[in-house]
Image (cartoon, rainbow, N blue to C red):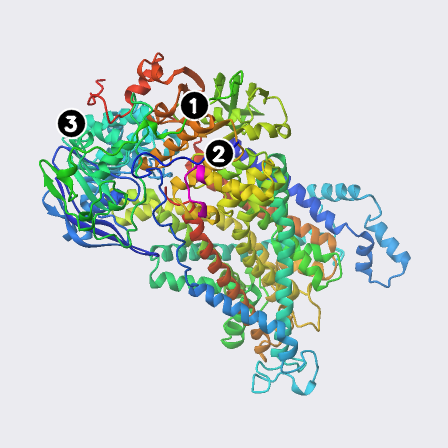
Amino acid sequence: MPVSIPKSGSVAMSVDQTTDAPVIERPPRRPMSLQLKMGLVITGSIVLLGLLAPWISPHPWDTISMRTRFVPPNATYWFGTDEYGRDVLSRLLMGTRLSLTMGVSATLVSLAVGVPMGLAAGYFRGWIDEALMRLADVLMAVPPIMLGLLVLAVTPPALWKTALAVGFVYIPPIARLARSVTLTLANEEFIQAAKARAESNSYILFREILPNAWPPLIVEASLRVTYAILLGSALSFLGLGAQPPSSDWGLMISEARSFIDRAPWIALAPGFAMCLLVIGINLLGDGARERLDPRLKSRMGKR
Amino acid sequence: MTGYIARRLLFVVLVLVAVSMLVFGITALLPANVAYLILGPFAPPEQVRALELKLGLTDPIWQQYVRWAGGFLSGNLGESTLMNRPIGPLLMEAIGRSMMLTGASFVLIAVIGVGLGIAAALRHGRPLDHGISVGTYLGIAVPEFFWAIIVIIVFAAWLGWLPASGYEPLSAGFTVWAKHLIAPTMTLVFGHLAHVSRLTRSSMIEVLQSPYVTAARAKGLPERVVIMHHALRNALLPTITVLALDFGRLMGGIVVVETIFAYPGLGRLIVFSIQNRDLPTLQAAILVVAAVYALASLLADLLYARLNPKIRFGRNVG
Amino acid sequence: MLLIDDLTVRYRTPGGEIEALSSISLKARKGSTLALVGESGSGKSTVALAAMGLLPQEATIPSGRILFDGQDIMIMNAEERRRLRGSRIGLIFQDPFSVLNPSLRIGDQVGEGLVHHRGFSTRRAFARAIELLDEVGIVKPEAVAKAYPHELSGGMRQRALIAGALASEPDLLILDEPTTALDVTIEAQILDLLEQLRRQRGLTMVFISHNLGVVRRIADEVAVLYAGQIVEQGRTEDVLQRPIHPYAKGLLAAIPRLGEKKGRLAAIPGRLPDLRNPPSGCRFAKRCPFATPDSDKPQILRELGDRQVRCTNAEALRDTPWPRLSEGEQSAAIAPSPHAGPVVAVENLTKTFALHSGLAFKGWRPVATSTQIRAVDDISIEVAAGEVLGLVGESGSGKTTLGRSILRLVEPDSGTIRIAGEMVSGKPQRALEAMRRTAQIVFQNPDSSLNPRKTIGELLARPIERFGLAPSGEIPARVRQLLDLVRLPAHYVDRYAHQMSGGEKQRIGIARALATEPRFIVCDEPVSALDVSVQAAIVNLLADLRDRLGVGYLFISHDISVVAHLADRVAVMHNGKMVEIGPADEVMNAPKHPYTIKLLSVVPRVDGPAYQANHK
């Protein structure tokens, strides 16, 4: 239907033009908060160190040398050596890759299963919602580490299996979050508008809901990585993850237990490394969330 | 409200049944492996077959499940393949000792954690708050087993105040019993304090910014009354849920902590049974854990329902 | 009783320092009611908070005095101020629900002030609370006193709050939009109550509102706030009937009047100035049709007879009305196509909701229970092509449900629906594609109706794409045409929703609905979330579009004046039933159903005879 451009009114000004005034500009790009910066720096450095580990390690991580056992930290061996004479620092660096891989891959597994679960539950409601959430409840009825133990108990241990188990264990919390985000979004009027255009369910889910759901999910995912790292190393600690002579941090701590009084550095180094990584990722995640949230708040701002 | 209780109870029962199926299902997935796991990969086939028959592994799965579940309900938890003893009494002892540990830890975590959270919220933005926030930030980053290592290094190796492992029953003397309990309790408390404290703090801050608190101040009520009478009630309600969740995490925590401190509780039992492929014990132990956790959640839910007027008094007056 | 002298308040925000109030001076005489009027962003709530000493930490007060009964609040210490609050000055907030502590009983909350200010025992305070609840007109005061906030309705909660504020017998009562969240009929009751209490107790009231009709009814004097400044102050009748300051003129011209029909509403163009950097001259100048070079000089509040006005051109403008658009401005209306039959025909539509399905026990057997609500009760209605059918009702009347059921966004339980001759009910959702093109909807909440992650261009292109209404090469041109239709500049195509104002977002919502070239649009409270001055522009736009495009509307609103202004016919809904329907003039001027009569009588009006209080 052709539309004709209206003639301007007979009054000196067009009183319906409410848009002559300057635009509400986006608030100027806020500088990154200290939190975010620190998070980026810490996490970034650790990731970098892990990636470059094979090339920057001062000594080979797996060479046994009985002469250099239990050397306290000194100029040659920055973090000392362990009970087999291996350089702790080099083992630490190689272990970085293992922890990061564990954290990221396990979280990816949780996301891959949990997000669709949550989306479906939150959008379709009804029996789908009930069924999926009851499933999640059952999985959450057992503390995560025990569920992980249960799964790993029936098969010879290997690190990739641990990653899978950890991913599996953390599906329910991700599903719950995805569901609650979806529930809030599904109540927004623009979803109703989409229905009023006879859009298909998959269009609404993927083109209307998901693009709005990603930000909080990504932030939560980054924090989940820390849980995955912690759980993974706990499982390795208990012997159900990485196997010797791997230098997974949890395994390193476990092996160092017997020598705590003699050579505490063997256990302390990986412990502190893990703390640092977890703190870094937390700062990153919290900083990112703060950046996203004010925009979220101003969008649904006061009238 | 009775409807609410009934529904929750039903739910708990259903979840436990489902968990039992899950627990049984996972371990029953590969029966052949089970026998080989016990006897070793090079065992002669006849031995394997004999063990399978003995453990009833050749029956259809659902039959095995019914047998197992039925046994459970009638009080017979089966026999440990490792120790060849009935599991029931074994579990009860272990549970008792773990309860001492978790009980003490839980009380400390609840009191200190909630206290810190409230203190931080009341001094929001000021040095105390920042201090507590930084502290809790560090707290959640430290893995449990590392706390244990630190506690051992500091209190056992360095200061020599506490034994690094083991357990003595109460009958051996109170101080001895207590000493063995302190290190693992400290470890658990350090590990979980931060979490509870942070959540309490944010709940309290949210309440302090709510309209009804502003209204209370607008009525000119003394600040003390505003906080104690108005704010706390509403802030502590979600804390109950948090504490219930934390109880579950605590139960997960005992796995590592008891292993490190060689404390003979449920956690160590579970790890032992895994390391030795003692599947019946493992299944029974995990199911018991799930039951305890479910019960704790139920209690928390009921407490919450009792304290939250919206659930307790649903109907309308006006 | 309350004198505010040259008060300035600034807030520190992440974006900079905002001057929320600039040199405000107000006087509320003992025993009278002063109203503070302004739109969002005017700073009226800040005045209330400042008077109570409740400003947040981010606020600073560089200058000014606030004198309560002769004493300056600003120089008191915190403890003295605290003792004033709740005992001599009472404050009543807007939203009665969130202001009550959900975990405490009503009676306790009402009586609290007495315990702490007058040393009552809790029991005595509770008993007094019951008396007060009775005084504010609550039936069964004991039951209510023992109840919790979530068990009461909105009107009852507000009464309870009033009881609480009155408990310590204050001298001054400050009310911040106390009836905005309430239905019109309840609002009338609360206003009556306030009037009565004021007379009985000799209260001084400061009444903050954006609703000029309410202000007319309850206030002796009124002060108009714009962008943190008082622009006019005087006796209510004078200011409302003969406004002097251009902003006041504009506000009054923007309000639709019952009984005065069909002229275009005058809208105030432009937006509020940025208060981080307030202009040194007149803050309203950019939007003022009477601006002169003098307007760039700082404006002071001057006396003009018994009025105070902040305008250098006040004398010259004294009798000049806000410019009205002449009728001939509209282009010729498209005659509706000679299509036999109405564009929407609904018969016997019913929709029932089940709430709170619960589990109860009859002895040992569990039994499912639920409460049913008949949101739409056997309604039959028609909308002719190109007609505007107004649907009026209070909250809970079912009007929104009716609108959505017609479009099958909510599934009706029974009844037939025909749109543009096609049967729409009884088909599965998949078969409704043609209907979705023909019938569209405009939503109420501008913050929620647009996908925040899409650009305006994408938002408007999607309906065109979806229904294949233009080859993809032509879509950008179509989008520009749509923007033009709703009078937004073409470069908005790349903007996102959060960069636009409420009024602009609503225009986009309308443009989106028009993108499919519909013949019928359900307008679900499209202006309820907007300021009065912006409202007028949107109403004008809708009227123009109807004339030009021949689209029929179902215009749903709780605000009768707006509906009456725009609609050809009006239907009134109450508790799911349609109680009256007829040509707009008839329904407004000669209503037949008692509910309609009551509704019309309690609407606070800016025109017509001065309000006579209801005598119970």
Q: CA distance from mark 1 to mark 2?
A: 20 Å
Q: Chain of mark 3?
A: C
- As drawn, the label of residue C388 is 1
Q: Chain of mark 2?
A: A
Quadrant of the rendered image containing residue A81: bottom right
- Which one is in front, C55 or B308? C55
Q: Chain of mark 1?
A: C
Q: Disc 3 vs disc 2: which is toward the camera? A: 2
From this view, report whether residue A78 is shown above or below residue B2. Answer: below
Going by the numbered disc 3, the residue's amino acid type is Arg
- As drawn, the label of residue C199 is 3
- Identity of the residue drawn at 24% across and 29% down: C132
The segment highlighted magenta reads: C484-491
Q: CA distance from mark 3 to mark 1?
A: 44 Å
Which residue occupies the extreme top position in the image? C592
Going by the numbered disc 1, the residue's amino acid type is Val
